[in-house]
Amino acid sequence: MGSQFLSFKGKSYHTINDAGRVSIPAKFRDVLKSKYNDESLILVTLGSHIVAYPYQEWSKLEELWERERLNDPKVNDFLRYLYSTAEDCVIDKQGRILIPPHLRESIHLKNECVIIGLRNKIEIWPKEKWEEKYEKIAVEELFSELSSKFPEINL
């Protein structure tokens, strides 16, 4: 399988140590190495969770925003916020990243988190927020509602 088909997928539960370090799942590190030839990420917060973009994916977003020449004040406010939370991050030899205190505090990330893969990015959720939002939804109802949007997977 070619690297263009590799994506981040799956979910795992992790503990954050007192210094703010958390292990990135090995399968996600494998995607970073195979598809991106890099172990660097850009971390940003989107209110309820942290998103970790591989540098190449973040660069694509920046190019898009530059090309669009956005003149909408709300969009500019959003980008200003997003960039103010952005942090460069490198995976250490133990497979961990350091989540800076301001990012942990902004989403109330204490010691337990859920790390999920979502196509071209990784999301880090406080365990309680993940469970509240995704573990208690009526999955069959949601699938039924969205089936017409995803006919290719026969929901």
Image: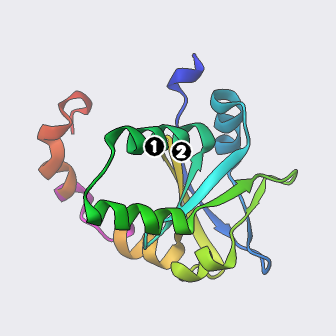
Q: Which mark is residue 79?
A: none
Quadrant of the snapshot with the N terminus: top right
Residue 78's x, y, as percent?
A: 37, 65
- Please tell me in which quadrant of the rendered image residue 124 appears: bottom right
Q: Which numbered marker is on residue 61?
A: 1
* Amino acid marked by disc 1: Leu
Q: Residues within 10 Å of mark 2 (few under 14, many from 20)?
A: some
Tag 2 residue: 58
From the top left corner, tell me how far across and down residue 2 is, in percent. 57, 16
Q: Which residues are magenta?
A: 134-141
Location of residue 67 in the rendering, given as x and y in whole percent from the top left corner? 37, 37
Nearest the viewer among 115 and 104 is 104
Asked if marks 1 and 2 touch (Cβ < 8 Å), the reply is yes
The residue depicted at 27 percent of the width and 64 percent of the height is 73
Q: How many marks?
A: 2
Q: Is residue 138 magenta?
A: yes
Mark 1 is surrounded, within 10 Å at the Cα level, by few (under 14), some (14 to 19) or many (20 or more) other residues, namely few
Residue 1, relative to residue 92: is it above or below? above
Which residue is nearer to you in this view: 9 or 79? 79
In the image as oriented, which residue stretches furthest toward the top? 1
- Name the residue nearer the viewer: 49 or 70: 70
Q: Amino acid at mark 2?
A: Trp
Residue at x-position 51% and y-position 78%:
107
Label 1: which secondary element: helix
Q: Is residue 142 left or right of residue 78?
A: left
Q: Is residue 118 left or right of residue 56?
A: left
Q: Residue at x 38, y 76 (%)?
A: 132
